[in-house]
Amino acid sequence: MAARILDGKALAETVRAEVRVSVDAFKAKYGRAPGLEVILVGDDPASQVYTRNKEKASNEVGMRGRLHVLPAATPEDEVLALVQRLNADEATDGILVQLPLPKGLREQRILDAVSPAKDVDGFHPINAGLLASGRPGLVPCTPRGCMRLLALAGATLKGARAVVVGRSNIVGKPVAQLLLAEHATVTIAHSRTEDLAAVCREADILVAAVGKADLIRGDFVKPGAIVIDVGMNRIDAGNGKTKLVGDVTFAEAAEVASAITPVPGGVGPMTIAYLLENTVTAATARMEKR
Ligand SMILES: Nc1nc(=O)c2c([nH]1)NC[C@@H]1CN(c3ccc(C(=O)N[C@@H](CCC(=O)O)C(=O)O)cc3)C=[N+]21
């Protein structure tokens, strides 16, 4: 059996078209564009590419996207001062601090400084707590993208066995919360899980979010399962080049699963699309509160 390949790139384009409609409605109602501010500290080449893409993607849907680049040696208090200035700025709806931060900057202190109402990453403990309590708030982008891909696959979540491999605050925990909210029976597995293969084989829905190439082999997948691969691993392609792969051995898993996301072209583009969605959601919520 060959699995259906879930095209995250095409689905992300659909989400962006939806966001464009919301942005136009927002502009008509409030006379300005939703504003996303992306903060990059340092000169990590991958982060430079990612943040430029985020700025570009936000402008393409009619928002006002802006990238702030600070030198790697910027003192923590200066980063905090920028976050606080943007928190207080009426035209700023979303604030994203690109991770990882350079050594010497305390990630938690900086992320906690972002106003929960403008926290379009959904990383603030207030938003994490709201999600865990089943209350409305800003939800992390990658987990939202995973749920939309499951909808594309036509997954029945109610009563399904879902296994999430990985327990990060950015993906594993929030995607588990979203699956639970949809009435799946959720297991969170991780590097210390005993017999990971056997646990994964129970899954109707398998979400891999660890960051380790080839962690999930074909024999980890229950026949007919839906596999969402969140991993982003840059590995040696053998020809002096590198290539991007997920956590799942794609060719093996695609023989067994009913549907599977590729890397690249799966979850990654959905993350950016939901960053835009979260920004217009945050903008609308702020304006409606005033
Ligand atoms: N505050 C913060 N929020 C983030 O959301 C955040 C972050 N920091 N730091 C880094 C990670 C990584 N991340 C990606 C998003 C999309 C792709 C993506 O679109 N990938 C393409 C391919 C990209 C390529 O070829 O390199 C794909 O999978 O098809 C990748 C990586 C967001 N992150």
Image (cartoon, rainbow, N blue to C red):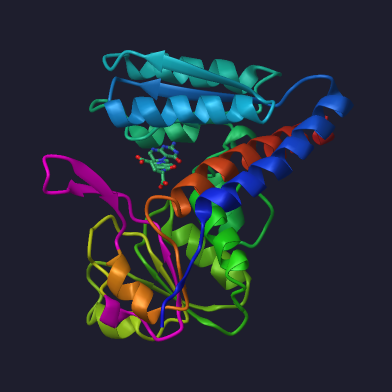
Expressed as whole percent of the image width and height from the top left, the position of residue 94 reads 61, 30
Q: Quadrant of residue 147?
A: bottom right
215 vs 100, nearest the viewer: 215
Q: Quadrant of residue 23?
A: top right
Residue at the farthest right position: 29
Instruction: Name the side, left or right, on which 239 lies relative to 266.
Output: left
Q: Quadrant of the C terminus?
A: top right
Residue 62 higher or lower than 163, as above or below: above
Q: Could you tell me which residue is drawn at 36 percent across and 60 percent down?
A: 209
Q: Could you tell me which residue is drawn at 31 percent across and 31 percent down?
A: 46
Quarter, ligand 1: top left
Expressed as whole percent of the image width and height from the top left, the position of residue 287 reads 80, 30
Q: Verify whether residue 228 appears in magenta.
A: yes
Q: Is residue 141 visible?
A: no
Q: Is residue 183 visible?
A: yes
Residue 95 higher or lower than 223, as above or below: above
Instruction: Name the side, left or right, on which 132 lies relative to 258.
Output: right
Q: Could you tell me which residue is drawn at 46 percent across and 53 percent down?
A: 267
Q: Verify whether residue 289 appears in magenta.
A: no
Residue 5 higher or lower than 290, as above or below: below
Q: Quadrant of the N terminus?
A: bottom left
Q: Could you tell me which residue is drawn at 67 percent across and 57 percent down?
A: 135
Q: How many marks?
A: 0
Expressed as whole percent of the image width and height from the top left, the position of residue 204 reads 47, 81
Q: Quadrant of residue 13?
A: top right
Range drawn in magenta: 218-247
Expressed as whole percent of the image width and height from the top left, the position of residue 111 reads 45, 34
